[in-house]
Image: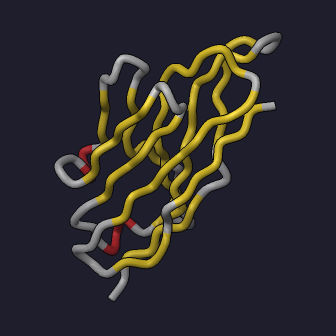
């Protein structure tokens, strides 16, 4: 059983900041890439940022310079620091990981999603 637990969403004013966190637990032997997607109602889920096990990061153009992804391999956690938030960042944010699970190989696992609302 693998579980991803997200935290940190909420309501913030434009220009404000939020920090999302994602913690992985369960019977896995390795975590590879971790990242965040977001979904706006009526639109496709889009990749926001990702980070490999070695720390290589990738960001969507729309959030470059404003969001920072990081991970702590010793704690199996990942964070997304979101600064200078805009109304168009409003979405449900999902963390995901590529994990190796005994007997199941490497698959992608998802968190339950956390709402981020940017509004005055």
* Res 27 quadrant in image: top right
**In the image shown, does 41 or 53 lie closer to the viewer?**
53
Image quadrant for the N terminus?
top right
The total number of labels drawn is 0
Q: Position of residue 117 (x, y in %)?
A: 44, 74
Residue drawn at 31 percent across, 81 percent down: 13
Residue 75 shown left or right of residue 28 in the figure: left
Residue drawn at 17 percent across, 49 percent down: 65
The vertical placement of 95 against 18, above or below, is: above
The vertical placement of 74 against 8, above or below, is: above
**Which residue extends farthest front?**
74
Q: Position of residue 63 (x, y in %)?
A: 26, 52
Residue 29 shown left or right of residue 116 in the figure: right
Residue drawn at 28 percent across, 51 percent down: 67
* Res 19 quadrant in image: bottom left
Q: Position of residue 90 (x, y in %)?
A: 42, 69
Image quadrant for the C terminus?
bottom left
The vertical placement of 74 against 49, above or below, is: above
Q: Position of residue 55 (x, y in %)?
A: 33, 23
**Which residue extends farthest bottom?**
120
The vertical placement of 14 against 110, above or below, is: below
Residue drawn at 64 percent across, 28 percent down: 108
């Amino acid at each position: 059983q693998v579980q991803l637990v997200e935290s940190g969403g909420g309501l913030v004013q434009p220009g404000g900041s939020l920090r999302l966190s994602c913690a992985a637990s369960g019977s896995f032997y390795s975590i590879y890439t971790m990242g965040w997607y977001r979904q706006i109602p009526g639109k496709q889920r889009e990749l926001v940022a990702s980070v490999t096990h070695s720390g290589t990061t990738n960001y969507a153009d729309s959030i470059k310079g404003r969001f920072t992804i990081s991970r702590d391999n010793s704690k199996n956690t990942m964070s997304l620091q979101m600064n200078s938030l805009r109304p168009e960042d409003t979405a449900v944010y999902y963390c995901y990981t590529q994990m190796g699970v005994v007997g199941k190989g490497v698959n992608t696992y998802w968190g339950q999603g956390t709402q981020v609302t940017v509004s005055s």
